[in-house]
Amino acid sequence: MADWVTGKVTKVQNWTDALFSLTVHAPVLPFTAGQF
């Protein structure tokens, strides 16, 4: 299992009272499509 990575929330987009999106800055490798 991978180790935990510490990141910082840089943006919060509230769409509704119960739905939101987060943008997080963290030192991780780019996602490669199909890797999971």
Image (cartoon, rainbow, N blue to C red):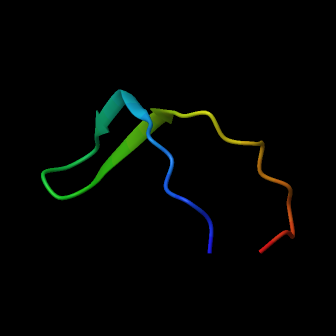
Q: Is residue 12 left or right of residue 23?
A: left
Report x, y in % for residue 33.
85, 61
Q: In front: 19, or 6?
A: 6
Q: In this rendering, is residue 31 above or below 11?
A: below
The part of the image, by quadrant, that contains residue 14 is top left
Q: Which residue appears at 26% of the width and 55% of the height?
A: 19
Q: Which residue appears at 39% of the width and 30% of the height?
A: 8
Report x, y in % for residue 24.
46, 35
Q: Is residue 28 left or right of residue 36?
A: left
* Quadrant of the rendering where the N terminus is positioned: bottom right
Q: In this rendering, is residue 6 above or below 11?
A: below
Q: In front: 30, or 33?
A: 30
The image shows a total of numbered marks equal to: 0
Q: In front: 19, or 7?
A: 7
Report x, y in % for residue 3.
56, 60
Q: Is residue 35 left or right of residue 13?
A: right
Report x, y in % for residue 13.
32, 35
Q: In this rendering, is residue 6 above or below 25?
A: below
In the image as oriented, which residue stretches furthest toward the top?
A: 10
Q: Which residue appears at 45% of the width and 35% of the height?
A: 23
In the image as oriented, which residue stretches furthest toward the left?
A: 17
* Quadrant of the rendering where the C terminus is positioned: bottom right
Q: Is residue 16 left or right of residue 23?
A: left
